[in-house]
Amino acid sequence: MNTQLVNSLAQIILSLSKEERSLLNSQINSEIKANSESDNIDEQILDLENKLKCYETQYQMSSQDFYQKFHTGELGDDIDFFEWSVFYEMWLSGQQELKFNHN
């Protein structure tokens, strides 16, 4: 641990005005919330990946291949296909959100 850095930061924080401390606190809370949301997204994506793997194993095709075939009407109207499609769309959305949060 860099105790000199910690001591310097403590001095800087103590020298801040009440408004500046409030702003700093707000910024820290915002970062904590963003990290928490990112962790939650990671958990949701893992859950979706497990669901997708079950369908991929059952139907012996990747979710990406399935999605293309399903949306061109090649696979029919089985309820599993609708569920798989929704899970895949949710997974894609989660991937986009992760990309957005990490940029």
Image (tube, rainbow, N blue to C red):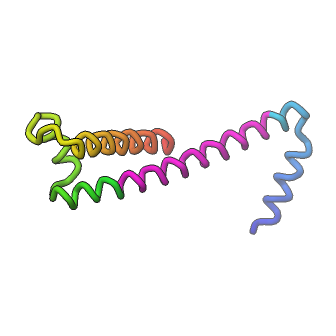
| Front residue (pair 77, 89) | 77
In terms of secondary structure, what is the magenta stretch mainly? helix
| Front residue (pair 25, 94) | 94
| Relative to 3, residue 19 above or below | above
Specify the quadrant that holds the N terminus. bottom right
Snapshot quadrant of residue 84: top left
Segment colored magenta: 23-49
Q: Residue at x 23, y 42 (%)?
A: 79
x then y, percent, for residue 62: 20, 53
x then y, percent, for residue 88: 30, 44
Snapshot quadrant of residue 75: top left
Q: Residue at x 54, y 47 (%)?
A: 38
x then y, percent, for residue 96: 40, 40
Q: Residue at x 8, y 39 (%)?
A: 74
Q: Is residue 93 magenta?
A: no
Locate residue 33 relative to residue 97 in the image: left or right. right
| Front residue (pair 49, 29) | 49
x then y, percent, for residue 82: 25, 39
Locate residue 53 relative to residue 29 in the image: left or right. left
Q: Residue at x 29, y 58 (%)?
A: 53
Q: Is residue 39 magenta?
A: yes
